[in-house]
Amino acid sequence: MTPQTLRRPPSLERRTTAARKHAEKRDYSKTRCLIENCSSTKAVELAHIFDRQRTTKLSIIEAIEWGWAMRKGSLNLDTSRNILFLGASLHEIYKYWKWALVPEESVVRQYFHKSFDLPLWRKDFRDIQGETFKYTFQPIQDMEDIYIARQSTDNSQEVIIHEYPFKTLPVLTSHVHPKYVILHLGQILCSGLVGSTAHYIMEKYPWLELVEALYIRWVAAIPRNADQDPTYAQHYPQDDVQSLSSLSHSTSTASFRTPLRRIRRLRPSVDDQSSSSSSSSDSSSSSTSGSSSQGTTSNGTGSSNASHDHKTGNSDARLLTYRALREQARDDKLENPKWTKNRIASWAEQCGLRGIVHSLEWNWGLKKGSLDPDLDTPGNFFFLGSSLHQMYREWKWVLIPEASALDQFIDPDILWPESYGRAEFPEVKENTFNYIFQPVFDMEDVYVTRVSDENTQHVDIHEYPFDKFPVISSSIDPRFVILHVGQMLTSSKIELSVKDPLREKYPWLDTLEDLFSSWVGSVPHDAFKDPTYVPRPDGYISSCSESSDSGVYVEFVYCETTYRRGSIRSSSASLSTTPIGLPCCTNSQNEDVPDERPYYHTVEEIQGEVVPLTHHALEQQDNRADLQSARWTIGRISSWAIECTNSADSALPPNTICP
């Protein structure tokens, strides 16, 4: 039994900063994990009791509003009473219905008539008042092999291990409202608990039949004449939900009070027309089940999503252009700018990581295009609990390779440590390597639990600075570990006061940093001449145009082999991100250049696969309506974005907000 999910769940507007602050203010646990009572530094996440994605199922949201005696369009699942804080691992398995909170029987019965066990009707419905409520942690499924480490106090040294079925866990106190807990639990009960699990839970909590009855009543179809009820639709006579949800937008970002409106949907779909018959998503989008998640050793090369037009939502991505920046700068009504200097700098830095892949292919002696653009390769995968995974991505801890793992990449014929060249670069042949678990920053209040190697029934608790943590043996390729640690050591986000003690503790980190810098260095301009890097396609013609102009038009033609179909196709419409064939220039210096080709700033900019996007090139595109949007790739935009952010003499107005 797992929650039903859609392949591509409809997009909703992001949770506002005000909603998070309000939840933090009301949280009884002071943003510590409700279950583990661990510090917020241990990858504690904001979680919804009743999944906010259910907003996309309009028939259910309308039914809940009716059952709870609310006005139409006023249910906001981002309310602080539907939000709590959980460790990332527990949050992950919560979304997959592996555990739930059980409210007290006395609370549940307040939603029923006193004289007979029937849920209160709309006219009789009364909301339960209270700042905090009591709940019991209840495992639902697949929790037999899971243990929970809970701090008994705020002192991280006092940790108690709780094992299935978690009878020793204390009763939990939280600010979350029981009606949202009942919705979540009722959803699970009505999905069809089977076998011994259903029997055990219903025997332990006989009043769960009442929870199931409440859920069925609250999500039942509303009366056909509901809109005629002045207490339901008096202020909202129109049926257009989109116009309803647009009300009180200003209060959503400026006030601590959750606005009385539904969460807006950004991407229209069939559900908007036939919400009563469509399937819905019962869990937040996630591809990982259970308490562990798959992580990559290196930080990866993916970029964050591009900014979207604030007028059209994210149904159509808005091009990052010079004109778009100016329009946003002049828009006084734009309360949440999608494009800010900090965001674009961070995004551009992530986008720039894609260029590293080509450098790695060159310096590791590989063929161009042989590495996955996102480094999705077996040697770059390992498994982590969700909490540790999140902290790993934030560089709060790293794996340190042994010095011997670095020696295999060092050329012994050179006096100072330097990586082997492309021709001599060694192949990694070993299957297992040893690594050291090393905290980097903000781990003082974090403890790590680990099943003992000697006794699988025993759990060891390791505390900062984790000196007693055992050496980790893994099949992770040391090259990717070097990349991850090298990124951390060279990143400006990590202070020197954090890096220097690490270099002192592990003297070979200087060598590691040298290897990293060597591997991510730029690819030589004449690399395409090396047949071991770019194999020559059939019919290759070595010709290239030259120009002494400061600007030049160039047309690339790629011969890209499609392995699945076994065919070769040519394309001049756009530059491929991982071309197999070699680009060749088809125009001569004296030819008339067709107007549909993109304009680039200098000849040097066409040497690489992705041409940097300059201010000059952007202005040319911005003033021409005939250019396709695909002309500007992520790599080009990120290059220009960095230039826009760092340029001291930018032509933008002083207060212009960059993406």
Image (spheres, grey):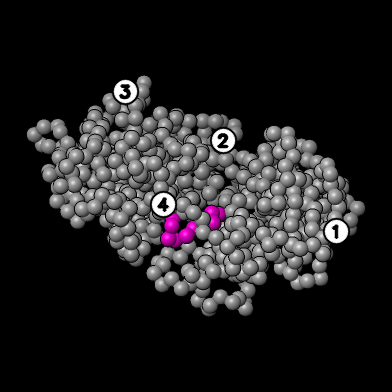
If you read the primary sequence from the N terminus, does the residue marked by circle 3 or circle 4 appear first?
Answer: 3
Check if mark 2's residue and mark 4's residue have beta carbons within 8 Å: no
Highlighted range, magenta: 304-313
Q: Distance from label 2 to label 1 (Cα)?
A: 42 Å
Q: Nearer the viewer, residue 499 or 224?
A: 224
Check if mark 2's residue and mark 3's residue have beta carbons within 8 Å: no
Q: Quadrant of residue 589?
A: bottom right
Query: Circle 3 is placed at which residue position?
Result: 199
Is 312 part of what is drawn in magenta? yes
Label count reads 4
Is 295 part of what is drawn in magenta? no
Residue 340, image x and y in percent? 51, 66
**Number of the label disc, if any, that sits on residue 416:** 1
Q: Residues within 10 Å of mark 4 (few under 14, many from 20)?
A: some
Query: Circle 4 is placed at which residue position?
Result: 266
Q: Residue furthest left?
A: 115
Q: Residue furthest front?
A: 592
Camera-nearest label, 3 or 4: 4
Q: Mark 2: which secondary structure?
A: loop
If you read the primary sequence from the N terminus, does the residue marked by circle 3 or circle 1 appear first?
Answer: 3
Q: Residues within 10 Å of mark 2 (few under 14, many from 20)?
A: few
Check if mark 3's residue and mark 4's residue have beta carbons within 8 Å: no
Main SS, magenta residues: loop
